[in-house]
Image: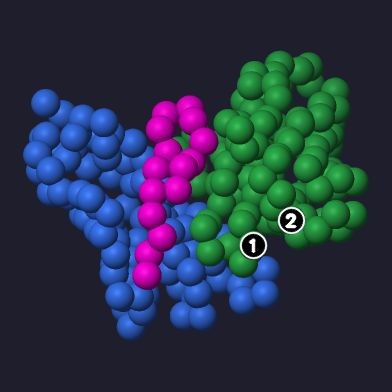
C-alpha cells in the first residue's frame, strides 16, 4: 500500500463549481499535513497547512480526519486559474522533517 | 529577496557524463532536500541534509551524490551510474521544525541525450 494516495483525476469542472479532493495516508503516526499546488512544468508551492480542527483560506478549506487517515481539500467557486495539480504531503517522522508526497490530483476548470 | 535559486533551468548532457546541479538558498534554513519528478509522478527524495557537513540518502540515491559544505548550498551531482537521469530536479528547504512546510526552487530540467 502506498504511503500517500491520491486520485490522479483529472477532475474536469466548470467555473463556479465546488470540487473536493481526498488524500489517504497509511502511517497513523503522521504528524503534519499540507496541500501544495503545482502548475505545469513549475515547482510546487504551498497552498495551505492542514490542522486538526480544519482551516479555511478564502475559497479553500482543508480538513484532517485522523480516525480514517485522510485529508481533504475543498475549493469553492472554482476559477480558471485554479487549474493545476494539487499535491498532498504528509510528514511521518517526529524528529526529522521528511515529507512524503502524493502523486497529485489534476484539476481542470473550464469556462 | 529571499528564496531558493537553481541553475541552470534547462540542462542537456550526453550519456555517460557527470553533471552537477546547483541549489542556493538565502532563507537561513538548516534542512535542504533534492527531489526528482518524472512526468505524471510524485516527488521522490534523492538526498537530504539536516545540517552542514551531514547528509542522508533518500529513497532513490543510487547514481547521485551531494555535498553540504555551506549552509546556503547543496549541489547535486548526477553521475553516469544513474540509469535514467532525464527528469525534473527540485531543490527544497524546510523552515525550522517544518511547520511552514517546504520551499522549492524553480527546478532544473535535465535531458540526457
Residue in the picture at 78% in, 43% down: B72
Residue A79 picture location, percent across and down: 19, 35
| Chain that bears disc 2 | B
What secondary structure predominates along the stretch shown in magenta? Answer: strand
Work out which quarter of the rendered image holds the N terminus of chain B and state it.
top right
Residue A42 relative to residue A97: left or right: left
**In front of the other: A103 or A50:** A50
Residue bearing the label numbered 2: B30
Q: Earlier in the sequence, mark 1 or mark 2?
A: 2
Which shade is chain B? green
**In front of the other: A38 or A102:** A38
Q: Are marks 1 and 2 in contact (CB under 8 Å)?
A: yes
Q: Secondary structure at mark 1?
A: helix
Residue bearing the label numbered 1: B96
Residue in the picture at 90% in, 54% down: B53
Question: Which dot marks residue B24?
Answer: none
Residue in the picture at 67% in, 75% down: A95
Specify the segment rendered in magenta: A37-51
Q: CA distance from mark 1 to mark 2?
A: 7 Å
Chain letter for the blue colouring in the rendering = A
- Asked if the stretch drawn in magenta spans residue A44, the answer is yes
**In front of the other: B74 or B72:** B72
| Chain that bears disc 1 | B
Q: Is residue B50 above or below residue A79?
A: below
Residue B86 showing in the rendered view: no
Q: Is residue B88 above or below residue A17?
A: above
Q: Are the residues under marks 1 and 2 on the same chain?
A: yes
Amino acid at each position: 500500500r502506498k504511503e500517500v494516495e491520491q486520485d490522479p483525476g483529472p477532475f474536469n469542472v466548470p467555473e463556479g463549481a465546488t470540487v473536493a479532493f481526498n488524500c489517504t495516508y497509511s502511517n497513523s503516526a503522521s504528524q503534519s499535513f499540507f496541500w501544495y499546488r503545482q502548475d505545469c512544468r513549475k515547482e510546487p508551492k504551498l497552498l495551505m497547512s492542514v490542522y486538526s480542527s480544519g482551516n479555511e483560506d478564502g475559497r479553500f478549506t482543508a480538513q484532517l480526519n485522523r480516525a480514517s487517515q485522510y485529508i481533504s481539500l475543498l475549493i469553492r467557486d472554482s476559477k480558471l486559474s485554479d487549474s493545476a495539480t494539487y499535491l498532498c504531503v504528509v510528514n511521518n517522522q517526529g524528529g526529522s522533517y521528511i515529507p512524503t508526497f502524493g502523486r497529485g490530483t489534476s484539476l481542470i476548470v473550464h469556462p | 529577496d529571499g528564496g531558493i535559486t537553481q541553475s541552470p533551468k534547462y540542462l542537456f548532457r550526453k550519456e555517460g557524463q557527470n553533471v552537477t546541479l546547483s541549489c542556493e538558498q538565502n532563507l537561513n534554513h538548516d534542512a535542504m532536500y533534492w527531489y526528482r519528478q518524472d512526468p505524471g509522478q510524485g516527488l521522490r527524495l534523492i538526498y537530504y541534509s539536516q545540517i552542514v557537513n551531514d547528509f542522508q540518502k533518500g529513497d532513490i540515491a543510487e547514481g547521485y551524490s551531494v555535498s553540504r559544505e555551506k549552509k546556503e548550498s547543496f549541489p547535486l551531482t548526477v553521475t553516469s551510474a544513474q540509469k535514467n537521469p532525464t527528469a525534473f530536479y527540485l531543490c527544497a528547504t524546510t523552515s525550522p521544525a517544518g511547520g511552514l512546510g517546504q520551499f522549492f526552487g524553480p527546478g532544473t530540467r535535465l535531458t540526457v541525450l
